[in-house]
């Protein structure tokens, strides 16, 4: 029980003190998980982090589930992942409730009209970084172009694209390796 | 029953989101279109706040969408729905970690998934641009191409991009600066 509480609190600290998630979280994870608690080695943490990006879901939660699992099995995984999300729940609900009651004010509307422009730019810069890593050859570019056009102009659930992309990726990789041999 | 529906929608988002928090965006637009629980404009504001507060962006957005759709209970259920697939999948994967990351099928799947993930985020960007940088209703009314794009919006976007490239500040500063510009110039009237 004490260990579960410790997992929850350690991951609540990690969730509550990192802005932006993803890569910003790694130094905090190293300090809490490797140096303070000794729950995992540096190498193990890097494995969790790498594989955490290759399974569905948010990287922070996936890493928490790995560490929790190692320390205390499924219950540990649940405690650690609840820890990561607890600060978000509290902070966002407080801000959302606050904004909801002021959203009619002109000053708030003007502020958000400006903020939305910045959101465009932030998403754009994130895309530029991801694009370089993901679009590596003709196949990935064609896949990118088709899915982008279909999503913008046709109303199709993104779930369908995710499933098709995984299958197409496997087939193309297999065909390529077959040719190489 | 909105609570059950919220949980189920976010369970699906958690199951099919690959590649970090922003990758959940297209799913959130899809939910908005199908359910009408929140508008595209509200979602853009939620992205801004999720980027400026502590915690993973994906979790922040799930919490925010849940709250906007169905209050505090909604935010808890959306967040739980979002993380439960992770708990199940990662718990299974952690039993054969090494084999998983070297598996050919897994590698092939991610080769395709990464490309689609970028395409879906691009489509989400188009949705945000539609409510922040271009004015389709005004363009349809006047037919003048200059009425389609918001010049102050483009200028502010260029300024944000320049600041990000030059100093690489934390997003919260870019968002805060844009909020101040929006207030000072009365951005709603300029659109």
Image (cartoon, grey):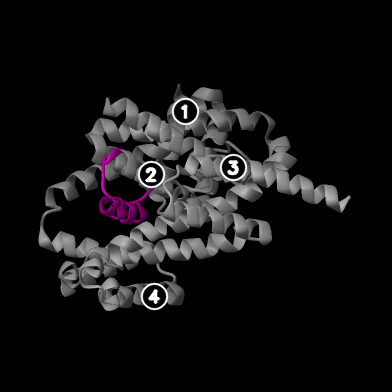
Tell me residue B173's x, y (percent).
33, 66
In the rendered structure, are the residues bearing label 1 and label 2 in contact, judged by CB atoms less than 8 Å apart?
no
Count the numbered circles shown.
4
Q: Secondary structure at mark 4?
A: helix
Residue A137 in the magenta stretch? The answer is no
Mark 4 neighbour class, 10 Å CA radius: few under 14, some 14 to 19, many 20 or more: some
Q: Real-space Cα distance between discs 3 and 2?
A: 18 Å
Q: CA distance from mark 1 to mark 4?
A: 40 Å
Protein chain holding label 1: A
Q: Residue at x 18, y 65 (%)?
A: A110
Left or right? Give the position of A107 relative to B85: left
Position of B169 relative to A63 (above/below)? below
Is residue B60 at least partly visible in the picture? no
| Chain to which mark 2 belongs | B
Query: Quadrant of the image for the N terminus of chain B?
Result: top left
From the image, tell me which residue sits under label 1. Answer: A78
Q: Quadrant of residue A86?
A: top left
**Whether marks 3 and 1 lie on the same chain:** yes
- Residue hosting label 3: A164
Measured in 3D between alpha carbons, the distance from the residue under mark 1 to the one under mark 2, in whole angstroms, is: 28 Å
Q: Quadrant of the C terminus of chain B?
A: bottom left
Q: Which residues are magenta?
A: B35-56
Residue closest to the far top? A1
- Label 1–label 4 contact, CB within 8 A: no
SS of the residue under disc 3: helix
């Amino acid at each position: 029980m004490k260990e579960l509480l410790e997992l929850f609190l350690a991951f609540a600290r990690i969730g509550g003190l990192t802005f932006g998630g993803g890569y910003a979280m790694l130094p905090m994870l190293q300090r809490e998980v490797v140096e303070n608690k000794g729950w995992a080695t540096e190498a193990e943490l890097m494995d969790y982090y790498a594989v955490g990006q290759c399974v569905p879901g948010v990287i922070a939660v996936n890493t928490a589930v790995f560490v929790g699992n190692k320390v205390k099995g499924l219950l540990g995984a649940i405690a650690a992942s609840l820890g990561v999300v607890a600060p978000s729940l509290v902070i966002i609900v407080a801000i959302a409730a606050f904004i909801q009651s002021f959203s009619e004010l002109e000053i708030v509307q003007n502020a958000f009209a400006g903020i939305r422009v910045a959101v465009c730019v932030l998403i754009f810069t994130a895309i530029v970084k991801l694009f370089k890593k993901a679009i590596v050859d003709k196949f990935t570019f064609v896949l990118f172009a088709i899915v982008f056009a279909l999503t913008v102009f046709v109303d199709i659930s993104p779930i369908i694209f995710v499933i098709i992309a995984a299958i197409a990726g496997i087939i193309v990789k297999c065909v390529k390796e077959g040719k190489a041999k | 029953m909105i609570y059950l529906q919220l949980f189920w929608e976010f369970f699906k988002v958690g199951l099919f989101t690959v590649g970090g928090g922003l990758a959940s965006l297209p799913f959130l637009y899809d939910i908005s279109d199908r359910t009408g629980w929140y508008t595209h404009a509200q979602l853009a504001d939620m992205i801004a706040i999720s980027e400026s507060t502590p915690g993973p962006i994906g979790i922040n957005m799930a919490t925010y969408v849940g709250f906007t759709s169905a209050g505090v209970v909604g935010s808890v259920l959306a967040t739980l729905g979002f993380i439960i697939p992770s708990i199940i999948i990662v718990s299974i994967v952690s039993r054969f970690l090494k084999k998983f990351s070297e598996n050919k099928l897994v590698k092939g799947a991610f080769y395709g998934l990464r490309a689609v993930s970028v395409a879906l985020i691009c489509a989400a960007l188009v949705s945000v641009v539609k409510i922040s940088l271009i004015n389709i209703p005004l363009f349809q009314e006047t037919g003048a191409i200059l009425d389609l794009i918001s010049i102050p919006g483009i200028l502010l976007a260029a300024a944000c991009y320049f600041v990000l490239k030059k100093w690489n500040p934390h997003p919260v500063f870019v968002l805060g600066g844009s909020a101040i510009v929006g207030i000072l110039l009365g951005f709603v009237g300029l659109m």
